[in-house]
Image (cartoon, helix red, strand yellow):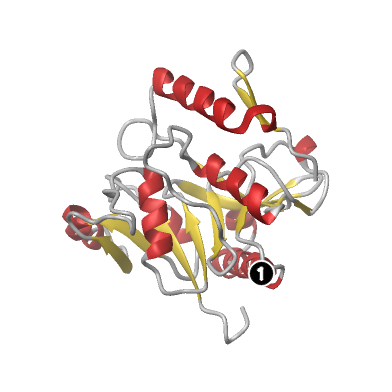
Amino acid sequence: MKQDISFNIYCMSYQRPDRILTQDLLEYCTYVVRWKEEEAYRNAGVKDLLVIPQGATLNDGTIVWSFMTTLYWVIENTPEDVIFVADDDLNHFCYRLDTYTNIKADFNNYREIATSEIERIAQLLYDLNLGFACDNPQFALYNYTQEFCFKGMPGGIRWINKKAFKAKFDPKDFATSDIDMMMQELLMNRIILQPRYFHSMSVKDKLEGGTTVDSKVNYQFRLAMKNKWGKYFDYDFKKNQAKINVKR
């Protein structure tokens, strides 16, 4: 990153102090945890913490209680120009071209490599004056078509350039999600930045913490997205696949 641009890496975590994964993949990382879990995460060896205080709210008064309210709280309460926010269950980063390269397994300096890639994309986002970047959850080799795409479903990592970021949180909107955040950025900034060559890989854990929701809530969310975004968002319930119908 250029010296006049401030940047930091954050990892949002909830009820998983015994499974500190993402921190090990990076040269530096600040964990975002709730006030009542601060001691547990410190005891687990987390070096840097941003603690959400008891009774924390967003600027609009919404109580911080969910993944999305926490994400918006991080955006509102961090001082950096550009931030990177990762899920807490990342096992490794990888390069995807015509083959996979597990950065952690194949390089001794894997933390430096992964951090440098994250900083590079943050710099690109800032230079392009765009608000949002993310990786793609579909990591199959046949999905690699180019180094960057300009729309797409968000995966386990995301970048926010605050000066250009335009998405807003609405507590009354049933479609509120990181997908909706991406759609708002497509609407107002016209494109997002999505690296296809660089991926986060996670270990899915449905026992504790995380953001697992039941099928009924998931179904209602898909319907809310379709109602809000109309022809620009579609979901195949049989194949369990979402589609962004925006031409770029």
Q: Tell me the residue at 37%/42% (across/down).
A: 171
Quarter of the rendering containing residue 107: bottom right
Q: Tell me the residue at 66%/37% (across/down).
A: 138
Q: Is residue 108 visible?
A: no
Does residue 83 appear to the left or right of 211 in the view shown?
Answer: right
Residue 80 locus on image (x, y percent):
47, 74
Q: Nearer the viewer, residue 191 or 48?
A: 191
Q: Is residue 131 above or below residue 178?
A: below
Q: Nearer the viewer, residue 63 or 100?
A: 63
Quarter of the rendering containing residue 147: bottom right
Report crowding for label 1: few under 14, some 14 to 19, many 20 or more residues within 10 A (C-alpha): few
Amino acid type, callout 1 = Arg
Q: Tell me the residue at 31%/39% (across/down).
A: 209
Residue 52 locus on image (x, y percent):
26, 59
Q: Nearer the viewer, residue 142 or 236?
A: 236
- Residue identified by numbered label 1: 120
Residue 227 locus on image (x, y percent):
56, 26
Q: Is residue 212 above or below residue 98?
A: above
Residue 175 locus on image (x, y percent):
48, 34
Number of labels in the image equals 1
- Which quarter of the image is occupied by the N terminus? bottom right
Does residue 43 appear to the left or right of 114 in the view shown?
Answer: left
Does residue 200 appear to the left or right of 140 in the view shown?
Answer: left
- Taking the view exactly as shown, the residue that stands out farthest to the top is 238
* Secondary element at tag 1: helix
Q: Nearer the viewer, residue 231 or 85?
A: 231
Q: Is residue 83 above or below residue 17?
A: below
Q: Is residue 17 visible?
A: yes
